[in-house]
Amino acid sequence: MENYTKYKLKERDELVSLLADKDNLFVIACNKCFKEFETIDEPDCGEFEKLAAEQGKTITGSAKVDFLCNKNHTEQNLQDMIPEGTENVIVISCGLGIQTVADLAGKPVYAASNSLNYRGHHGMALTKKSCDACAQCYLNITGGICPIVDCSKSLVNGQCGGAKNGKCEVDGEKDCAWEKIYRRLEKQGRLEEFLNQPIQIRDYSKTNVKVIQDYVKSIREERLEGYYGGVHPSERKEFSEHIALERFPEPKTAVISMSQHLGAPANPIVQVGDTVKVGQKIGEAAGFISAPVHSSVSGTVVAVEPRMHATRGSEVMAVVIESDGKNTLHESVKPNKDLESLTPDEIIDIIREAGIVGMGGAGFPTCVKLKPAKPVDTILLNGCECEPLLTADHRVLLEFADDIIYGLKAVLKTTGAEKGIIVIEDNKPDAIELMKEKVAECGNIEVFVARTKYPQGAEKTLIKRVMGRKVPSGGLPADVGVVVDNISTVKAISDAIQKGMPLIERVATVTGEKMKNPGNYIVKIGTSVKEMIDYCGGVTDDDVLIKMGGPMMGFALSDLNVPMMKGSNGIIAIDTDQTKEEACIKCGRCVDVCPMELSPLYFAKYADEQNWQGMKDKNVMDCVECRCCQYICSSKIPLVDKIKAGKNAIRGMK
């Protein structure tokens, strides 16, 4: 494999000269990027420490850090790391890492390496600095601020004298680099040393690669909008976003799984031969984290047996009902008292009995979520629908706006929260306009417009984007005073209160570039996926991947004879992925895009080694499996599969 490493240690004579008048050194080395990921720690740090010891220098400590140029991660790693007594910080990295540390260390920073071999920025690095790879580094002279890049004229011996009010005369929006250099050197007591040094002459015969600064700036602005990380996959919502909801035909046979929520599966309470009606309970919750299941059709129970589960890839207990086509309502389906007359506990009981769970994917029982152990002040309604292709929630916003607001008011009353915020991505302007009109007279409900980015709808990223609050590692939204619900979930709450109807149907999108006739449907739970695809005209060819859910977090279906469930927000037909997995090259992009600020490249390496403790130590349990890392991976490593394997192994550890 070609090695594109971006730095190497300076020659011995240069390092000896660098150390001549310096002592009490703290050494920070970047674990090299753009090379095959064979070793956790690169050897450069040890080599430098050995040389420094030979020169009689005191090393106060050392650290090896991945992707030093990633300021978000480096800032976290350097907190309280540099020991007392440190006088100088030595950095072994490319120019980007050196500049990043110089901004954070608060002490004189010196480069022990030369930059080489790259285009001025690390992949999609989020650092605010760049490097021109001039192979003639001035950072040791200028306090870690690069005069080549930061000065519009690339002056190497001081300012031109044209700055006005601290701004460059060439670019009025840019700070004068040399004024910043002078201030930093003066603060470090090094200004006189700089002013007495020999004149610098830039050697243009050395490597000089033009940095595409405008590109880096635009990428950085997009990537840090609202929260760290995330990606911008092709949305492809145009296939179905304009298509109004249609009620999907009644299934002749409904296969209703007892496991369509997080927690314990429901226990079937009907038998073969029983006659059931629409809305009748057929599965009883089996514990605190569980939810009852109801019949979506009227007819006869023809089987109570294990059937294939769409998202688990194995069989789970299900109740199979042959529909009589009459849609006869069960006697329990009747409107409740008006919202003003209901107590919070009565609302919780209604939600529990209706079998309502989170309809954005995870399927957590809503009755449990709405009784958090800690007080909450804000309810966030997730109307982002950040997954590409899917448009079900978009149509719910447009066609059930009043029900959404009613359900949100019920949640506010139940939790005692002061404010409700409906969050919608800016790629849904019609929904934004409608919801703003609807909440105009609601004093405690507002609409928040979020710039489109995936995975905006993940609970923790949504909270950080809207509230500026960070849920702690291993924590829950309630830890920061927030509850997050999907807009389809609160629509179901509205149905349960106003109609007495349990969760027996939902809105789902059938779409994709390989689907002949995309659409948005109100579909009954237990309807066959194959029936839905056939109803939409089938797929365009045989080279197709069918997923339940979106392209990022959806589940590939090898068997289409599986039922729609409470969390099934879509069926997509897309191109198959024929790319071949290659070895990790430590490009760092997975680190740059992870919204949970993790290091996915280690998960892949440790999973291959079955080093489950290593994965646990790297906080793999905080991963939300959004697939950003896998989406961006240049080596096409199936990172999410490896992460899931690691999580399962960790759960089984004693």
Image: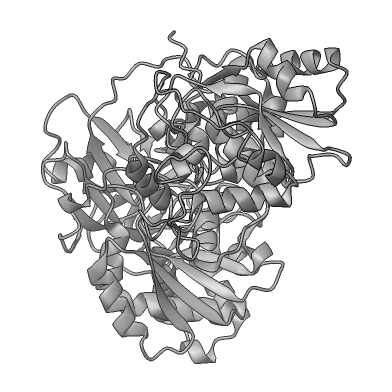
Q: Quadrant of residue 393?
A: bottom left
What number of labels is visible? 0
In this orientation, which residue lies closer to the viewer: 390 or 496? 390
Q: Quadrant of the C terminus?
A: top right
199 and 72: which one is in front?
Answer: 199
> In the shown orientation, is residue 65 left or right of residue 570?
right
* Residue sitting nearer the eye, 613 or 232: 232
Left or right placement of residue 531 versus residue 347 in this view: left
Using the rendered image of the protein, determine whether residue 333 is visible from the camera's viewpoint: no
Identity of the residue drawn at 61% across and 31% down: 198
Extreme residue in the top direction: 1
Residue 339, above or below 523: below
Residue 582 vertical placement versus 340 (above, below):
above
| Residue 545 picture location, percent across and down | 26, 30
Q: What residue appears at the point 29 percent right and 54 percent down from the top-left corner? A: 508
Q: Position of residue 287 (x, y in %)?
A: 65, 54
Give the camera-side residue of 107 and 267.
107
Quarter-of-image position of residue 348: bottom right
Q: Is residue 184 above or below residue 49?
A: below
- Could you tell me residue 103's position as x and y percent? 63, 46
Residue in the image at 62% along x and 33% along y: 647
When the figure is inspected, residue 128 is found, relative to residue 277, above or below; the finding is above
Q: Position of residue 486 (x, y in %)?
A: 44, 63
Q: How is the image coloured?
A: one colour
Can you tell which quarter of the image residue 123 is in? top left
| Residue drawn at 22 percent across, 30 percent down | 575
